[in-house]
Amino acid sequence: MTQQMQPYNMGVVEVFVGDLSKWMGRAMLLFAVAATVWRQALTPDGFVGGLLAGATAIVGAVLMLGGGGVRQNRAALDIGFVLWALLALGVGGVLTVSAGLAWVARRHAVNTRYSPRFFSGRQFETMIQLADVMIHRVGVSDDQPIRVAADTDRELAERADIRPGQVWGGFFLLEWVAPLLMGLPIPFSDLGTHTRRRILRRAARRSRIFQPVATCLTIITNTQRMQALRERANPGSK
């Protein structure tokens, strides 16, 4: 049975991820304050102890910001999870377990919300940001990027000439490598519309590398043009 996509309602797992991020953020901030007062009891002496307390405070603040808006502050949440994982590798213990739980819950929240048939959860999020750029380019600015991404996912799932493994490389490069080429160590999906548009222009010059992305852009463009034609033919159906 195919699970229905719920793009707008907050799911139980998303609420859990937000609450977990906020509570861990508060705990880290409290630990950082306590480590400043009782440094010898909670952290190593010297520079390492101060570095640990400072890093814990920064990660806690970012997690609280991300947890305050799982969707609106998604960039902060992603950065907070990365910093959380790095801190857990250095400290271990409860931080490692909680960081692993948070990563699993975050991934499950995305898959539960969108239920993609062709893309993975991360690829679908990238697809939404591609749609956000493209729908303005083809002159249909009032459509929802999530719906456009869902239409693209459904069309690709019904095509026999494209398999999920064929798009993995192109989407991985677009999501993680392409921003680095512009000096931005931030995933494509977490960037603003203008920056994402600039990255796509550069990617277009390397069409062979980003061929799977180009295929999705073509589908988006055709879908939106057909939608525009339908709206012009039936103005009341919008």
Image: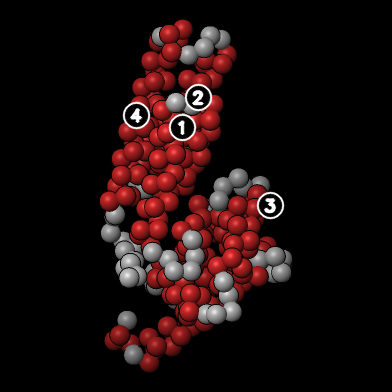
Asked if disc 1 and disc 2 are in contact, CB closer than 8 Å, the reply is yes
Mark in front: 2 vs 3:
2
Relative image position of residue 234 (x, y in whole percent)? 34, 90
Query: What residue sits right under mark 3 in the picture?
Result: 181
Instruction: Tell me the kind of residue under disc 2.
Output: Val
Residue on which disc 2 sits: 91
Number of callouts in the render?
Answer: 4
Rendering coords of residue 99 (x, y %): 44, 36
In percent of the image, x 46 and y 58: which residue is there?
Answer: 121
* Residue shown at the point (30%, 40%) measured from the top left: 19
Position above or below: 42 against 21 = above
Q: Residue at x 54, y 20 (%)?
A: 51
Residue that label 1 marks: 96
Residue underneath mark 4: 26
Q: Residue at x 41, y 28 (%)?
A: 94
Residue 104 in sight from this viewpoint: yes
Residue 170, by quadrant, is: bottom right
Q: Is residue 199 visible?
A: no
Disc 1 from disc 3: Cα separation: 31 Å
Give the amino acid at mark 4.
Arg
**Marks 1, 4: nearer the viewer:** 1
Instruction: Indicate whether 149 appears above or below 101.
Output: below
CA separation, marks 2 and 3?
Answer: 32 Å
Mark nearest the camera among 4 and 3 is 4
Q: Position of residue 150 (x, y in %)?
A: 42, 70
